[in-house]
Image (cartoon, rainbow, N blue to C red):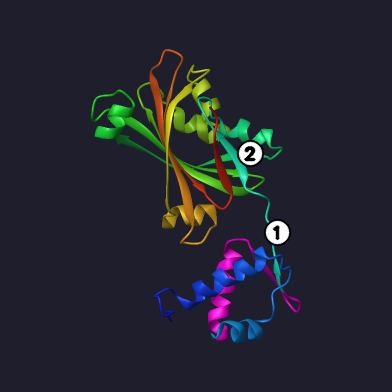
Amino acid sequence: MSQSADGIARWRRVADEIREMIGGGLEKLPVETELAARFGVNRHTVRRALAALAAEGLVRSERGRGTFVERLPERLVYPVGARTRFTENVSRLARQPAGRLIAATREAADGQLARELSLRPGAPLHRLETLHVADAIPLSVGTAWFPAERFPNIVAAYAETGSVTKALAAHGVDDYRRHQTRIGAERVGRADAAHLACPADGIVLVTESANYDPKDVPIQFSRSRFLADRVELLIDS
């Protein structure tokens, strides 16, 4: 892989330069030969940069016509507060929400999960891996843990409804609240990048939170990864 003087791959630098061009209002990109001459690279490097931008959804190629800028919807503003609900948040923005179960396993609570869920270490948990979309555009992937003894059928309930709220209601929990949310950021993992249809070097906003039932008993701990290019987190106080 060819590198620039500062150690960053040339194709990545070219992609960044094209992003700046797009930010300036460009609608159609120059042909590959012109881009190669402008950035002092070969056409293979330009093609790799364009492929990365296409994977991000920023450009599209039309056979015989050229490469055009794809104007994506603005970032979805996602409120985070005591009653955070994915379906409600997305529906308020006139977008169509959906959730899908990626995988589910049963595991024993480690020290952190035992503390978060007020359980003994080793207590059985259901772990759900989920994907959340709005208007068929992937926004986030999440990992959630539920006490298996209290929620024995949570996996089937979520798989059927695509909603944590509805899955909990099927177990008699009609309301729940979030005590706090920790927010960070990191580079997307390989598996998450595949589900989010984003580049391998994408950035995700990471939230960790625990939900409690009306009797103040913890019922769920979750770790969600929101693609930063598509979601803006709003702290709802």
Magenta span has 169? no
Decide if residue 184 is on the left or right side of residue 57.
Answer: left
Q: Is residue 201 above or below residue 99?
A: below
Closer to us: 191 or 149? 191
Residue type at mark 2: give it.
Answer: Pro
Q: Secondary structure at mark 2?
A: strand
Q: Residue at position x 49%, y 58% from top?
A: 202
Q: Which residues are magenta?
A: 42-66
Magenta span has 46? yes
Question: Disc 2 versus disc 1: distance between alpha carbons?
Answer: 21 Å
Q: Quadrant of residue 125?
A: top left
Q: Residue 180's spot in the image, x, y percent? A: 42, 28
Q: Residue 36's spot in the image, x, y percent? A: 59, 84
Closer to us: 174 or 26? 26
Q: Residues within 10 Å of mark 2 (few under 14, many from 20)?
A: many
Q: Which residue is mark 1?
A: 71
Residue 97: give its label.
2
Q: Residue at position x 24%, y 33% from top?
A: 111
Residue type at mark 1: give it.
Answer: Arg
Front: mark 2 or 1: 1
Q: Residue 170's spot in the image, x, y percent? A: 52, 21
Q: Residues within 10 Å of mark 1 (few under 14, many from 20)?
A: few
Mark closest to the chain's N terminus, 2 or 1: 1
Q: Point out the image quarter for the N terminus.
A: bottom left
Q: Is residue 203 above or below residue 61?
A: above
Q: Is residue 123 above or below residue 22?
A: above
Q: Residue at position x 57%, y 32% from top?
A: 161
Residue 133: give its label.
none
Q: Residue 206's spot in the image, x, y percent? A: 44, 44
Closer to us: 174 or 102? 174
